[in-house]
Amino acid sequence: METNATDNILVDLSKKFAVDIINICDTARKRGKAIAVIDQLLRSGTSIGANIHEANYASSKADFINKFHISLKETYETAYWLDVFCKAEIISAQEYNYLFNACSKIRKLLTVSITTAKGSAANK
C-alpha cells in the first residue's frame, strides 16, 4: 500500500502519543495507583499507533481500512480511560487535557483517512 502525507503524520503523532502514554502509565505505577486500569490505558493507547503502522503494510485497501478502523476504535477506548484516570485523580487535569487533545487529533486524522481511503476504493 502506498502511504500519503496524512498517514505519515499519523504514524509520527501516534508514536509520540504511545510514548506519552507509556510515560504517564509508568509515573502512575510509581505513585502506586490502580495497576489494572493502568494496563488498560497502556494497551489501548499504544495499540493506536501499532495498528496505524501495520496499516502501512496492509495487503489490500480493505485491510488498510480495517487497520485504521481498529485504531479509530482504540482512540475511543483510550479517551474513556483518560477520563477515568482524570476523575480518579490518577492523572492531573493538565495531563488529561494534553493527552485527550492528542488522542482527538489522531482520531480526526484517522476519520479523514478512512473516508478518503473508502472514496478511492469506491472509485476503482
Image: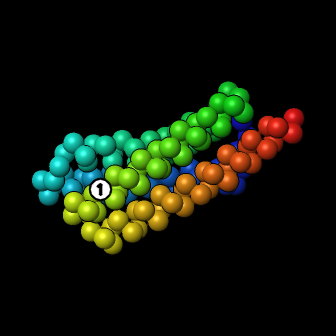
As helix, strand or loop, the secondary structure at mark 1 comes to: helix
- Which residue is disc 1 drawn over? 84
Residue reaching furthest to the bottom: 94
- Residue at the image position 35 percent from the left and 65 percent from the top: 96
Observer-nearest residue: 33 or 20?
Answer: 33
- Residue at the image position 44 percent from the left and 41 percent from the top: 47
Whether residue 9 can be seen here: no
The colour scheme of the drawn protein is: rainbow
Density class for disc 1 (Cα within 10 Å; few <14, some 14-19, many ≥20) is some
- Residue at the image position 27 percent from the left and 68 percent from the top: 92
Above or below, 89 against 50 in this view is below
Whether residue 41 can be seen here: yes
Measured as percent of width and height from the top left, residue 31 is found at 14, 58
Q: What residue type is labelled 1?
A: Val
- Residue at the image position 67 percent from the left and 27 percent from the top: 59
Measured as percent of width and height from the top left, residue 50 is found at 49, 40
